[in-house]
Amino acid sequence: MSTLLARGPAPAGAATTRSSASLRACRGPAPFRSHFQSVVASAAPAAQDAPAPEKPQKQQKQQQQKKQGGGGGGGGGGKAAEAAVTPRSEDFSKWYLDVVAKAELADYGPVRGTMVIRPYGYSIWESVQGVLDARFKELGVQNAYFPQLIPYSFITKEAEHVEGFAPELALVTKGGGKDLEEPLVVRPTSETIINHMFAQWVQSYRDLPLLINQWCNVHRWEMRTRPFVRTLEFLWQEGHTAHATAEEAEAEARAMIDVYTHFATHTAAMPVVPGRKSRIESFAGANCTYTIEAMMGDKRALQAGTSHNLGTNFAKAFNTQYLDKEGKRQLVHQTSWGVSTRIIGGVIMTHGDDKGLRLPPRLAPIQVVIIPIVKKEEDRVPVNEAAARLAAAAKAAGIRVKVDMDERQTPGWKYNHWEMRGVPVRVEVGPKDVQSGTCVTARRDMGKEGKQMGVPMEAAAFTAHVQGLLDTIQEGLLAQARAFRDDNIVDVTSYEQLKAAVAEGKWARGGWSGSDDDERRIKEETQATLRCFPFEQPAGPHTCFMTGQAAAEVAIFAKSY
């Protein structure tokens, strides 16, 4: 067990053991590569997603009732919901942009390549923050904040780091109307400025380990962007740690990728493949990079989180040393690790369907929406009171719930609205339900077959039923995504087989002992990159599909975002 995992209890289901293959040691400093993969499609102009002019409310309601049968409908919400977004099978990229816009997750900023995260999109990020921040603190990590403006000289101190990030830097050269003596870099990542501070804070072995995290924004001057997946500015958390030994730093880097794996799998219901990056795919300035790779609905890979063993590379550049127990000065060994708002894009592309979002219950800001159905004024008070009682019972049971009391819209419109936003469970309450003491529930992950009548309104029975639905939906989304991933990974034994697999949009897995040039050739000829050497390795022996020579490991190649 790593030293980090020993600092606090692991969440239920978290892995605490490692296979011998997964403990393969990091190799020396990686050559330059830019931190992220190139995106495959440019964002559509904002005008394409602009809403149509509003119609008079009465006419709008009449049209909605006509389309939706007067607002009743089953679990699906009618054809209006189906037509709300471009079908995934027709144009995955346009479908994605439609969902981001129509679910009101984000909008385009006035500066090309930037996005405005709307309240509902930000609430999903807050769910990510809540789960990860709690886990970090269990492991002894403390939050801090470091300046957004970094002296350019800091970036140049670590050679691979500056080479890797130079094309993406945004520089400030003027301040207060005057030229600055030294350009300032708008934070692309914080290894340099944090090392500047660590060099002042760390004096003795008693100051170690030093475990710091910050939640912040970063800027990278991307040329082609897509909301959440790749933007000029994005939100993330970045952890930075300093240790006395190389073994402790390696254990930390591995433990944090385990944290991300657990979060992705058990909270986001994304069945990621954790593994080690190749040398040329590793973070600029790291000895090695660990990653979690997720398969999106179009079969492309998404790097959903990374953890880097930095060795002593930044410590050498910033002279970050400590006095050991023998009174000798030693360089600290470091890690950095992060997850960004890119994870939201991953959730959309993993679980979304032609009706919009499908959010895993453990991540959903709203797990249950209650919709009162009132046709006569005399029914309004008893129906609304019943809905409020159900909401209070759900809230008391720890369920995140909302009652949609908006009287301007029909029930059918509300069904479509909350389906688009991916709320896992809908509860319907009408006057007949109040009389019978029951209600109706509908699951977002299913169609009409997910609708259940006669659910008791009694608090204990109602909350038990709803919690059971949420657990079932969470497990079902993970199972669906895992089956899709496994069905689209192909084992290959030759380069021709890899090219055929990649041409079909699938992931190719095979023995690998090729050179850096071989890896670059595959990228140039197929646009597929080496995603990782998975921690879970199949039994050998393995033969490299490229060279025909013996291979110690298998690797996964795929096209990616």
Image (cartoon, grey):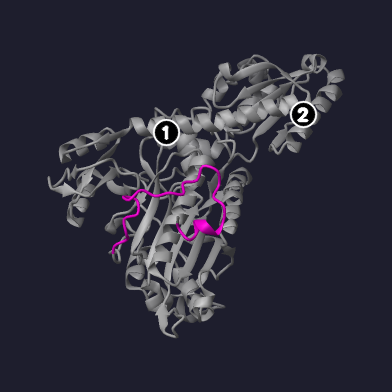
Quick check: is 3 in the magenta stretch?
A: yes
Q: Mark 1: which secondary structure?
A: helix
Q: Indicate the quadrant where residue 544 lies.
A: top left
Mark 1 — residue?
482
Q: Position of residue 345 (x, y in %)?
A: 48, 43
Picture residue at 82% right of the left edge, 14% below the top:
435
Q: Give me the C-alpha separation between circle 1 and circle 2.
A: 34 Å
Amino acid type, mark 1: Arg
Picture residue at 32% right of the left edge, 59% below the top:
25
Q: Nearer the viewer, residue 494 or 89?
A: 494
Give left or right: position of 529 versus 342: left
Q: Position of residue 364 (x, y in %)?
A: 60, 39
Which callout, 1 or 2, points at the residue further toward the start of the chain? 2
Picture residue at 51% right of the left edge, 71% below the top:
149
Q: Is residue 164 visible?
A: yes
Q: Position of residue 410 (x, y in %)?
A: 70, 23
Q: Mark 2: which secondary structure?
A: helix
Q: Nearer the viewer, residue 400 or 411?
A: 400
Q: Nearer the viewer, residue 114 or 309?
A: 309
The span shown in magenta is 2-27
Q: Indicate the quadrant where residue 136 lies.
A: bottom right
Q: Indicate the quadrant where residue 397 lies.
A: top right
Task: Decide whether the magenta segment is chiefly helix, strand or loop.
Answer: loop
Amino acid type, mark 2: Leu
> Which residue lies most toward the left here?
548
Mark 2 — residue?
390
Residue 193, disc: none
Picture residue at 56% right of the left edge, 50% below the top:
116
Category of crowding for the residue at label 1, using alpha-carbon neighbours closer than 10 angstroms: few (below 14), some (14–19), many (at least 20): some
